Amino acid sequence: MKTPTDTTKAPTTLTSSTFENLVQEMLVRLGEDPNREGLTATPERVHKAMKFLTKGYQEDAEALLKGALFTVNYDEMVIVKDIEMFSLCEHHMLPFFGKVHVAYIPNGRVIGLSKIPRLIEIFSRRLQIQERLTTQIAETIQNVIQPQGVGVVIEARHLCMMMRGVEKQHSAAVTSSMLGCFRNEEETRSEFLSLIRQRPNGV
């Protein structure tokens, strides 16, 4: 079952030949010769790349978490920070990338730590906007394990800003989603934000 915010739908499946014909036509329309040496295998490569970069449409985020739930008597903050994230923006289909920081306070159940990066992978391997990605991660954790609260912060750079448009090379977008006690309790929220800013010695 998908989360309430998971309104993205899997794209209509195209056969390999149809997809590759579309890429070949795009090359022609860009003024290229799709038969020249460097481009003859490009349609196939693009097809394989896009299948990988959008494979999240075929995966169930809630099922992933439900398969790694553990009952535990622990009610302190759990944080997994500096998780690498790569996605494609749905407006220009250009990459955006950065770090995701996730925290939650258990309410009798925890999830395997490795599942948090996998959850991020599922949602980021779709055409996205950063704001929706942030909310999907937080609400999926909240819906599945019903913790006391969840906090998610994403810091990302967008190639649609860096390579085109305003061409600001060092700009970054920061988004957050705070649910439960992370939204209602300033002390909890501040502790989370303080902890994700800390860096290990020597970094």
Image (cartoon, grey):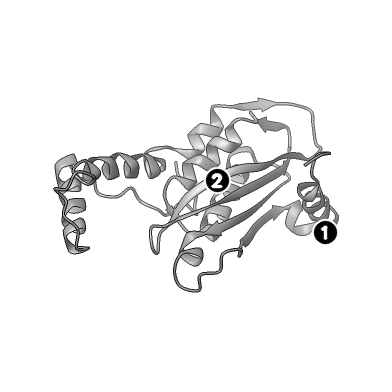
Residue 65 drawn at (x, y percent): 55, 33
Task: State the residue at coordinates (84%, 39%).
Answer: 201
Occupied quadrant, residue 145: top right
The residue at the far bottom in this view is 166
SS label for mark 1: helix
Name the residue type under label 1: Glu
Q: Which residue is mark 2?
A: 85
Compared to 151, does 171 lie above or below? below
Q: Residues within 10 Å of mark 1 (few under 14, many from 20)?
A: few
Residue 101 place in picture, x, y as percent: 67, 46
Other residues around mark 2 within 10 Å, as few (<14) / some (14–19) / many (≥20): some
Disc 1 marks which residue? 186
Nearer-N-terminus badge (1/2): 2
Q: State the residue lying farthest toward the front.
A: 37
Which of 140/202 is in front?
202
Residue 16: give x, y in percent of width and height: 19, 40
Q: Nearer the viewer, residue 140 or 123?
A: 123
